[in-house]
Amino acid sequence: MSWQRLRSLLRREVLATFRDPFTVTILIAVPLVALLMFGFVLATDVRHLPLGVHDADGSVVSRRLVAELAANQTFDARPYATRAGLDRALVSGEIAAALVLPPRFARARRGGTPDDPPEVQVLYDGGETALAGNAEGFMRAQLAAAVREWLAAGDGTDRAPPPTGVTVVSRALFNPRLDGKPFMVAGTFGFVLSFLTVLITAVTIVNERVTGTFEQLQVTPATGFEILLAKILPLGAMFAVDVVIMVVVAGVVLQVWPAGSIVFFVAVSAFYVLVSLALGLVVSATSATAAEAVQKSVLFSVPLVQLSGFAFPIRNMPLVVRWIAEAFPATHYIRVSRAIYIRAAGPTEVVSELALLGLFGVLLMAYALRSIETRA
Amino acid sequence: METARNFWSNVGAVAYKEASVLRHDKALIGMVLAQPIMMLLLFGFALSNKPANVPWAVLDRSQTALSRRFVEAIRTSGYFLPPHAVGSYGEGREQLKTGRALAFLVVPAGFRRDTERDGAHVQLLLDGSDPLSSARIEAYVGQIAAAFATRPDAPRIVSPASLPGALAVRQRFWFNPTLNDRTFFLTAMAGMLLTNLCLSAMALGLVGERETGTYEQTLALPITPIEIVLGKIIPYVGMSYVLLVVATVAPGLLFGLWPRGSWIVLLLVSLPFVLGSLSAGVFVSAVSHTSAQAVFIAVFFILPSFVLSGVLFPYEFMPDGVRQVGMVFPLRWYQIALRRIVQRGAGFTDVIGPTLALVALFGVFLLATRSRIRARLG
């Protein structure tokens, strides 16, 4: 290994990378677009959900209940004169939930007993699973609040039901409002660094193979290890810059700053980029044309999004799929990224995941080195 | 009249040539066959937002039969792993911080005594770094706790759907009674597969020919750009319909998820979507210089399509601005139509809006492509 050779190789790689404006554009644009896109897609709070209301009672009490439901902007109430009209609106997707107040609702409530309470019917559009699940939670909470108010006001039933059941006082640590942004932002680092690194290395190397410049490299006195380092280090440095840009944009635009140490996060990310670049070298070694390399990286990005825990929690998957998920380096990086970004974890808390990433890195590097030395 | 016949004959000739090429493209055919299987497996079996195997910690300061029964009631709900008992509050928080627990339940020392006074309280700490799971777990535990009978003589609340005392809520989830994610994903699967096929196949179409030099030959023919584009598109329309049928029949056979609406409406609405996606692919091909670039741009059309259209995440949740950006992708409108037809059994009048949007997008992409191709001819 000679420093002089490595230096000239590094110079060559830096020049080659920056000569292609398309690569540079992608290196800047993709992380930003991904961050802004993913940062906003996961939300847990419901706002302005169209709620169809069929108020067959039409009394003061029922109208007040509807007004209370519409008051805090979770639901936008739309009246429907008939039950059939309500059903049709649910079928056509005009409304996401429907509330049916039976005739004589007010009277039933006044005469209601704990054993025979007045009844309301709530229908949800179950097709939109997540939406229905969240809407249900809000609907319950609001109905419960309305009921508590009636009981407190003492109108109608003046004897409060005996306290039974257990009240849960819950609090979310690290992210008290259960905002979706930090979860997605920390995951997006994993997505961008895994996908883009593999894509760019694979394309640049395959292009060199196609044009023949890679063979020229191989016949220079440079060793395989030097070529590998020269390929990886400039890209690694550029992705480290990408990480910093993303941290700043996530902080300024999305208001998500890392809770843990920024320096530690950037260091861990730079380390992961090296692992991922090695994976890109492996992909390039098995592709004949640039288009094929891109298609392979794209195919690889499907499990990356869906099995790495980026969008869907791994613990919800069946056992075999969970094992497969653990075999992706991205899974471990995303875990570490979330731990540092949201839970302010330090080195001691993520040491086992980092060790696994290191193991992946060594294996992939060894394989990449072999492919550089042997294949023309 | 003569020009019209000429036009269609030219389109037919290009379509025939394209179909012969397509027949020999093993990589593409392999992709078309492999993708539905992969998606069926992922969406049918692997992916779910419903919490399962949730690790949790319990600090039981009460240590009574009642508190143990309460912990047991939560555990047996089916969402949780066996609880990890911790000895101190700090230890429980540590479990949350290291990610070994997603929830931490604290039962206070006076738990049993409180049930005889003004009601018992427990504390639940959640890991906010996984907001979606935490929100659901919070709701589950709240429901279990509210229905938990603290006194043997207290009237048991049979239905967890009823609020104690003053109001009974009867609720139903239409179209998907058990509220599983599988239905949500699989309904839109056809849209995802078609987007993948149309974009990745067409993106390479023009640019690939330009690289191999066959594009110049085509240009030398007495044929207009729009005829080339239409001729290239037609074989893929046929292929898309095969894929659509596969993507609709497979969930039906495997999971009993047959379309409730009419097949005719489904096939009709799919036409502007397929045409729109294909012309988007042609547009990508027309603006890129190398085939690697073309695939790249295609990917960055496909990915936002998936993320912003609502096939994976409900678009209703997205903030203003982001939600509107999703409207430029044909997949947004198609998935709205799919969900209405397949899940709700909606008729044609219910999907006129999305259909018109798809037709409009098709027109826009076609015009944009046409201007790009002309510029290259000159």
Image: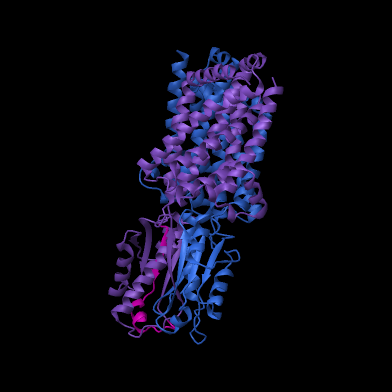
Chain colours: A purple, B blue
Q: Is residue A118 left or right of residue B181?
A: left
Q: Is residue A57 above or below residue B97?
A: below
Q: Is residue B281 above or below residue B63?
A: above
Residue B54 in view in this figure: yes
Indicate yes or no whether the magenta region holds residue A109: yes
Residue A197: x and y in percent read: 55, 32
Residue A88: x and y in percent read: 43, 59
Residue at 59 percent of width and 55 percent of height:
A315
Indicate yes or no whether the magenta region holds residue B206: no
Residue at 55 percent of width and 36 percent of height:
A271
In the image as oriented, which residue stretches furthest toward the bottom?
B153
The one nearer the camera, B287 or B336, is B287
In the image as oriented, which residue stretches furthest toward the right?
A374
Residue at 54 percent of width and 43 percent of height:
B191
Residue B213: x and y in percent read: 59, 14
User: Which residues, given as a range, are shown in magenta?
Assistant: A95-116
Residue A126 in view in this figure: no
Q: Is residue B85 left or right of residue B171?
A: right
Residue A202: x and y in percent read: 59, 27
Q: How many marks?
A: 0
The one nearer the camera, B29 or A249, is A249
Residue at 50 percent of width and 75 percent of height:
B159
Q: Is residue B21 above or below residue A49?
A: above
Q: Quadrant of the C terminus of chain B?
A: top left
